[in-house]
Image: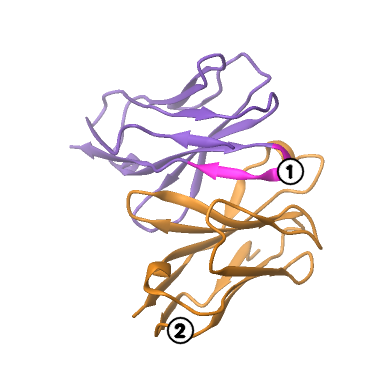
Chain colours: A orange, B purple
Amino acid sequence: NAGVTQTPKFQVLKTGQSMTLQCAQDMNHNSMYWYRQDPGMGLRLIYYSASEGTTDKGEVPNGYNVSRLNKREFSLRLESAAPSQTSVYFCASSDPPPLTYNSPLHFGNGTRLTVT
Amino acid sequence: AQTVTQSQPEMSVQEAETVTLSCTYDTSENNYYLFWYKQPPSRQMILVIRQEAYKQQNATENRFSVNFQKAAKSFSLKISDSQLGDTAMYFCALKTSYDKVIFGPGTSLSVIP
C-alpha cells in the first residue's frame, strides 16, 4: 500500500524556470492538500481540494497553481520559480466520508525544492 | 480566518519526565477538530492525537494526552514518561469546515538522556 506518493524527491531550479510537483494517493481519499514547510514557520497551506473538481486557496497561494486531475492526483505548478519558493513541499490527503471531517492527514515524504 | 499559535519554539525535557507543549487557536466555527502531529528528523509526519471540539472529554493515547479548553481556545499536549524517541518537531493543527487544515509554527522538543 503506497499511501501518498510525491515526485520528485529533490529538485533544483533556476529563477524563472517552471516545474510541476506531482502527488498521487491510492487510499480513495476525497481531500488533498499542498503545504510548504520553512524553518520556524511550520507547514503553511498553499492550496487544497475538498473533492474532485474543486480547489481552494490556502494561506500562501501566490506564485502557485494546482490541478486536481482526478480523485487520485493533485499537482502543484510553479510557473516562474523565485528564490522565495525554496522550501520543502508536502502533499497530503484525508479519509473519505463519513470520516472526512475528523480524520487525520496522510502525508507524502516531501519534495525539497531549491531555487537559485 | 483561522489561526494556530505555538508560543514555545523550543523545549527540552529529561528522559522519563513529563512535558507540556502549548497551542492556542482561533476560529469562528463551532464544529472543528484539533490534532497534534510529530515530525522526527526523518521528516515524516506522524499523527500523535486528535480531539473533536464537541467532546468535552480530553483525548488520551498511551503516554500522550491533551488538555482541551474550548472557551480559552487552548489545546496543549502532555507527554508523560518522555523517551528519546519523542525528540521531534511537534505541530498543532486545526481542521475546520470544507476540510481546510491549518498548522501552527511548531515546537522543537529535545529529550535529554
Residue designated by label 2:
A16
Chain identifier of the residue bearing label 2 in the image:
A
Tell me the amino acid under the disc marked 1.
Tyr
Span shown in magenta: B97-103
Tell me the amino acid under the disc marked 2.
Gly
Residue at position x 42%, y 75% in the image:
A82
Q: Where is residue B2 drawn, in percent x and y? A: 57, 36
Residue B108 versus residue A43: which sits nearer the camera? A43
Residue B100: within the magenta? yes
Residue B65: within the magenta? no
Residue at position x 66%, y 18% in the image:
B55
- Left or right, residue A105 beside residue B93: right
The vertical placement of A85 against B5, above or below, is below
- Left or right, residue A9 beside residue B33: left
Chain identifier of the residue bearing label 1 in the image:
B
Q: Where is residue A46 drawn, in percent x and y? A: 56, 58
Residue designated by label 1:
B98
| Numbered-mark total | 2
